[in-house]
Image: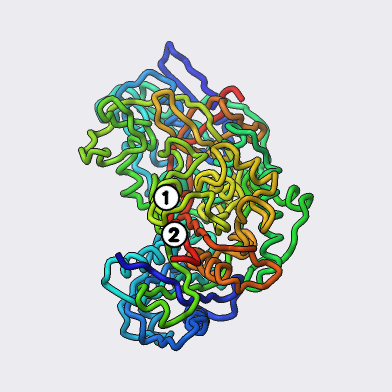
């Protein structure tokens, strides 16, 4: 992500690494906003007219997404405001309800054809109906603090993630309260061809030449699997490090499912 | 306690079968009954356990009742058993326990799957339904992906390379070439298997089993009835089953299957034998790395030696220390999910009675083992069979 901050005015702007014309294969204005918020000290914030410029807006609970994945609190009396550009893939956090004067963002060159193809594929995917494996929006949200915020449960000193109900003694494990590290170590990885990828990705996988997944371990012990993002020119390595970023995972039944993806740090 | 004998066994050819569920199942029951040496009627059956995922959803509910209705077993107590790819391995175990407990004397265990009459998009949906839907699938994983993660980690931890997996593929195609009921009856050269299309790095097409149609069934009876039906029963000497975390990331290690280890331990103990007593084993090689892990988890070789075991040809028919996948395994014989477990038992039935095609008969086969895994190792059933009680 590219960020321009003007601390004197407390104005912060962000675009993707592709600049103001595209948020990338799995990004949008919401993922940009969440990434920007994670880079700034957490405060209370008003949503203003931010949601009006989101794609597939009816499927997204912006407040839920912000509070599950960052320490920011949505508050209609807050002195900070979240903004999104109507046409460009730009977001901002300012101290004014009025739309800011947007700076120019350049970025990595990309193929307009690829951008348009992926945009169309997302639109097709999100109206598709599952015929097999299915995770409802409700089920997706039940675990949102773990899925988006990496909150783990503490079971007598052992951290548990993703969430569980009972431990091996049959005792109920308390709600998640411990934040896992924001980086993790790669234990293994694979790149699935379009033919090997799950059906949820059957539209985009051929265009993106497959999907990559890593199995990682957090310093605190728990392990997890994540899709890789921004790995176009990079190959993972066992024992390498990843960080996490919120991206679109897939669309189905009218909803975009968001989650964390791993980004290579030092491979 | 009652001993359990297998007196009949049959299966369809695995592959692209022209018939649907009812047709495949009735063909299987017909073959199983005709394999019984003395007079046997479908009305002799008291209980039936049929493994299936009901792939494609064409008959998701009451699958088993439909099948028994169309195979002359109308009225029998029947149920579908579902544990992903281990469905009929568990159906076999349930049938064994029904007789062991004294609740039934004549039981059918079987399995069925119709996979290749679906559109490509519907098949893709169904191929992923047995993994961890919420966390693994959303991270882009299907079973080729989970086994690819395992393979890469295995190569990292132990003295093994992808070439060791190629040896597994070449061997199983060599075994399956001569099996009349195998799906992929073709020999594959080392060079061809080595350079296959990459499905999930590092696994190529030649590391992956095919999707097959098929059905299989065995007839089990209590010991006092065994010689009423045959002079050469195959005894189900031991049975064991285990389970583990559904998702790879919840397991302490991804280079061993605890469900297999647990199931094997129970099966060896109930049979009163050890790994060195096994002459042939049908193991669950849905992906070639799975056979490497199985040879370790079943005790045929030590931990970390599975690559060497494959490389040195230890599992080749009549050449190594134990014949692994004389049928061709899932890789060549095929993998009609719910039918695979009892399909393995059908192969052991024929091998122990020395009734296979002569060219692929395992010499002096006395004790055989089946190993049927659900998904990436969440469930496993292991059975041990012998010519002697």
Q: Give the percent coordinates (x, y) of residue B4.
A: 38, 69
Which residue occupies 52% across, 72% down?
B114
Q: Residue furthest top?
A: A8
Asked whether the viewer can see residue A101, the reply is no
- Could you tell me which secondary element the residue under label 2 belongs to? loop
Which residue occupies 27% across, 70% down?
B102
Q: Quadrant of the C terminus of chain B?
A: bottom left
Which residue occupies 63% across, 69% down?
B182
Q: In this view, does A247 lie above or below A256?
A: above
Instruction: Identify the residue position indicated by label 1 in the image.
Output: B378
- Could you tell me which secondary element the residue under label 1 belongs to? loop
Asked whether the viewer can see residue B242, the reply is yes
Estimate how packed mark 1 is, as few (under 14), some (14 to 19) or many (20 or more) residues with alpha carbons within 10 Å: many
Q: Which of marks 1 and 2 is nearer the N terminus?
A: 2
Q: Residue furthest left?
A: A171
Q: Give the percent coordinates (x, y) of residue B329.
A: 60, 60
Q: Give the percent coordinates (x, y) of residue B138.
A: 46, 46
Q: Mark 1 lies on which chain?
A: B
Which residue occupies 31% across, 26% down?
A178
Q: Quadrant of the N terminus of chain B?
A: bottom left
Instruction: Identify the residue position indicated by label 2 in the image.
Output: B84
Residue A110, quarter of the rendered image: top right
How far apart are labels 1 and 2 at the CA level?
Answer: 9 Å
Are discs 1 and 2 less than 8 Å apart at CB?
yes
Pick the front one: A214 or B119: A214
Q: State left or right for residue B219 relative to residue B283.
A: left
């Amino acid at each position: 992500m590219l960020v321009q901050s003007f601390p004197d005015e407390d104005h912060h702007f962000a675009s993707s690494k592709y600049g103001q014309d595209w948020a990338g294969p799995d990004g949008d204005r919401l993922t940009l906003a969440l990434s920007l918020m994670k880079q700034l000290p957490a405060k209370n914030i008003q949503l203003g007219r931010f949601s009006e410029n989101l794609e597939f807006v009816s499927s997204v609970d912006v407040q839920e997404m912000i509070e599950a994945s960052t320490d920011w609190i949505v508050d209609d009396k807050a002195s900070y405001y979240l903004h999104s550009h109507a046409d460009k893939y730009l977001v901002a956090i300012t101290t004014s309800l009025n739309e800011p004067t947007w700076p120019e963002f350049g970025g990595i060159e990309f193929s307009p054809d690829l951008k348009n193809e992926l945009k169309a594929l997302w639109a097709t995917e999100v109206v598709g109906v599952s015929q097999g494996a299915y995770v409802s929006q409700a089920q997706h949200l039940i675990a949102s603090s773990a899925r988006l915020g990496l909150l783990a449960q503490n079971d007598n000193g052992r951290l548990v993630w993703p969430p569980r109900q009972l431990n091996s003694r049959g005792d109920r494990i308390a709600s998640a309260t411990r934040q896992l590290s924001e980086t993790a170590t790669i234990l293994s990885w694979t790149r699935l061809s379009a033919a090997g990828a799950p059906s949820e990705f059957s539209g985009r996988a051929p265009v993106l030449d497959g999907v990559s997944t890593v199995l990682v371990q957090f310093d605190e012990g728990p392990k997890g699997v994540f899709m890789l993002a921004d790995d176009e020119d990079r190959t993972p390595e066992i024992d390498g490090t990843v960080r996490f970023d919120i991206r679109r995972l897939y669309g189905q039944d009218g909803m975009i499912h968001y989650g964390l993806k791993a980004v290579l740090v030092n491979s | 306690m009652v001993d359990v004998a297998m007196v009949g066994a049959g299966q369809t050819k695995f592959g692209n079968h022209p018939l649907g569920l009812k047709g495949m199942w009735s063909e299987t029951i017909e073959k199983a009954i005709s394999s019984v040496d003395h007079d046997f009627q479908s009305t002799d059956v008291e209980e039936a356990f049929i493994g299936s995922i009901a792939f494609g959803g064409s008959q998701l509910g009451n699958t088993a009742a439909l099948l028994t209705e169309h195979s002359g077993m109308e009225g029998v107590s029947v149920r579908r058993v579902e544990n992903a790819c281990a469905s009929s391995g568990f159906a076999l175990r349930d049938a064994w326990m029904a007789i062991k407990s004294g609740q039934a004397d004549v039981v059918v265990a079987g399995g069925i799957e119709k996979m290749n009459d679906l559109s490509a998009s519907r098949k893709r949906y169904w191929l992923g339904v047995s993994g961890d839907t919420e966390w693994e699938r959303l991270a882009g994983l299907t079973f080729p992906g989970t086994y690819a993660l395992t393979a890469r980690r295995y190569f990292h931890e132990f003295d093994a390379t992808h070439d060791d997996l190629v040896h597994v593929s070449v061997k199983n195609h060599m075994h399956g070439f001569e099996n009349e009921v195998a799906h992929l009856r073709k020999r594959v050269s080392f060079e061809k298997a080595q350079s296959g299309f990459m499905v999930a790095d590092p696994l190529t097409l030649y590391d992956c089993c095919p999707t097959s149609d098929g059905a299989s069934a065995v007839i089990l009876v209590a010991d006092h009835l065994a010689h009423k039906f045959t002079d050469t029963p195959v005894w189900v000497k031991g049975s064991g089953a285990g389970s583990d975390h559904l998702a790879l990331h919840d397991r302490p290690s991804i280079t061993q299957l605890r469900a297999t280890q647990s199931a094997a331990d129970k099966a060896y103990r109930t049979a009163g034998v050890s790994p060195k007593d096994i002459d042939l084993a049908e193991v669950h090689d849905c992906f070639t790395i799975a056979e490497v892990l199985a040879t370790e988890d079943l005790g045929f070789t030590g931990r970390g030696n599975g690559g060497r075991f494959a490389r040195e040809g230890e599992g080749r028919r009549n050449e190594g220390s134990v014949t692994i996948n004389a049928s061709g395994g899932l890789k060549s014989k095929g993998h009609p999910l719910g039918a695979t477990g009892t399909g393995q038992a059908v192969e052991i039935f024929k091998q122990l009675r020395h009734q296979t095609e002569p060219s692929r008969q395992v010499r002096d086969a006395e004790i055989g083992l089946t190993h049927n895994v659900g998904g990436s190792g969440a469930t496993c059933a292991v059975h041990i069979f012998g010519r002697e009680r």
